Amino acid sequence: MITNIEKISATDKARELIAKLQDRNGAIMFHQSGGCCDGSQPMCFTTDDFKIGESDIKLGTIYGADFWMSKDQYEYWKHTHLTLDVVPGRGSSFSLEIPMGVRFIIHSRLLTSEERKVLNI
């Protein structure tokens, strides 16, 4: 039986980039608002540069960086497992990785029925 379910994980490329960003910037965090355009991609900030709201939900911690999502967006994604990844390209946002010519993206998969039971979803 499954007892520990992670809602968010990361590829090796994402963990490597997180480590670089932490070396350059100190403590970092992620937020995904679910807005249009860049708001639908995960954004990376220093922990001092982004204020978490009362309606934000912490999905987990990736390589020392907390990953938050707006409650409204979570309602759409609560039945999925998310994997943080990195792709070449430049988004038009304030996310820390943008000057490096890459951007974070999310891959998702539906949770299994057993995972949903454990999470009471």
Image (cartoon, helix red, strand yellow):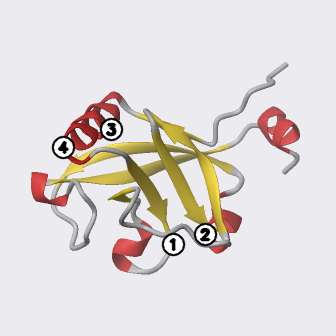
Q: Is residue 86 left or right of residue 58?
A: left
Q: Determine crowd level at label 2: few under 14, some 14-19, many 20+ residues with C-alpha closer than 10 A.
A: some
For label 4, the residue is: 24
Of the residues under marks 3 and 1, which one precedes in the sequence?
3
Camera-side mark, 4 or 1: 4
Camera-side mark, 4 or 2: 4
What amino acid does circle 3 point to?
Ala
For label 2, the residue is: 73
Q: CA distance from mark 4 to mark 1?
A: 27 Å
What amino acid does circle 4 point to?
Arg
Residue 78, given in percent of the width and then of the height, sits at 70, 56
**Quarter where residue 7 is shown:** top right
Q: CA distance from mark 4 to mark 2?
A: 30 Å
From the viewer's side, name the closer residue of 75 and 49: 49
From the viewer's side, name the closer residue of 18 and 112: 18
Residue drawn where x is 74% and y is 27% of the image:
4
Residue 119, given in percent of the width and then of the height, sits at 82, 42
For label 1, the residue is: 34
Of the residues under marks 2 and 1, which one precedes in the sequence?
1
Q: CA distance from mark 3 to mark 4?
A: 15 Å
Residue drawn where x is 34% and y is 33% of the image:
15
Of the residues under marks 2 and 3, which one precedes in the sequence?
3
For label 3, the residue is: 14
